[in-house]
Amino acid sequence: MTRVPAFLALGDSYTIGEAVEPEQRWPVLLAQRLHEAGIAIDTPRIVATTGWTTDELSAALDALEAEHGPLPRDHALVSLLIGVNNQYRRRGHDEYAEQFAALLARAIGYAGGEAGRVLVLAIPDWGRTPFGAASGRDLAQVSAELDAFNATAARLSIEAGAHFVDTAPLSRTLSVDPAMHAEDGLHPSGAMYAAWAEAALPAARAALAHSAAAQAAAAASTPPTSIPFP
């Protein structure tokens, strides 16, 4: 039986889909869009929790693997979206860069060492939400800091050969529509997540094509287990 390509999604509230139904999470919607395009992909395995920072995601992966054994290293698609809580807690850019780089390397490992199977999404600007407007924070500074985080994530992703999907401008444009915010006024609605999934679709298709090509090349290079006697 042919194994359905596996999808691992790593992140925080934006990946677990805080304040929306499970079927409205962006990784789930992305898998649905791939299915609609005739591309096989398994239901995403999501490792994400609201509030996690980069180091907390890393520690959670450590704990998960210590309890249940190593995660598979043959995922056809791995997504990573992390960092908003680093910025929200006023943690530094250099720390984010170092910890994001480690998580990116870990994501590539879960993708069989194939960076082309990894999809990184930009951090959205929480300052453009109703929660942000009422927060009393310097929203220009919030935007500038998130832009710096995203620039670093983009650079590191591209240098590694991973796909970076810059959904930040899209999120800012759509944020003027109240329907793009969940009831909590902070997190995206299902409609916003659907827009992210649509934006991520071309990169996901490319990642899965890379995965299929890598698997075919590995199969072609594998020596036979036995040689028939003439």
Image (cartoon, rainbow, N blue to C red):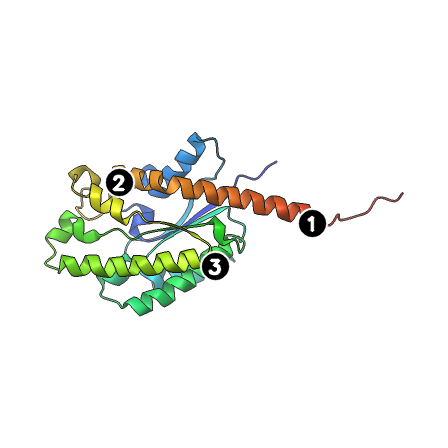
Could you say where residue 98 lies in the image, as x and y percent from the top left? 37, 67
Question: Quadrant of the image for the C terminus?
Answer: top right
The residue located at (45%, 56%) in the rendering is 107
Residue 45 % position (x, y): 43, 46
- Residue found 55% across the figure and 42% down from its top: 212
Quarter of image, res 196: top left
**Kind of residue indicated by mark 3:** Glu
Of helix, strand and loop, which one carries label 1?
loop
Q: Is residue 86 left or right of residue 39?
A: left
Q: Is residue 112 visible?
A: yes
Sequence-wise first label, 2 or 3: 3
Q: Within 10 Å of the Cα at label 1, are there few (<14), some (14-19), or many (20+) other Cα atoms?
A: few
The three-letter amino acid code for the residue at tag 1 is: Thr
- Farthest residue, direction right: 230
Q: CA distance from mark 1 to mark 2?
A: 44 Å
Q: Quadrant of the N terminus?
A: top right
Residue 222's disc is 1
**To which residue does mark 3 refer?**
65
Q: CA–CA distance between discs 1 and 3?
A: 29 Å
Tag 3 secondary structure: helix
- Mark in the foreground, 2 or 3: 2
Disc 2 packing (10 Å; few <14; some 14–19; many ≥20): many
Q: Is residue 148 above or below residue 169?
A: below
Q: Which residue is mark 2?
A: 192
Disc 1 versus disc 3: nearer the observer:
1
How far across and down, in percent of the image, does residue 183 sit? 18, 42
Q: Is residue 60 visible?
A: no
Instruction: Give x and y (percent) for residue 165.
Output: 36, 48
Residue type highlighted by circle 2:
Met
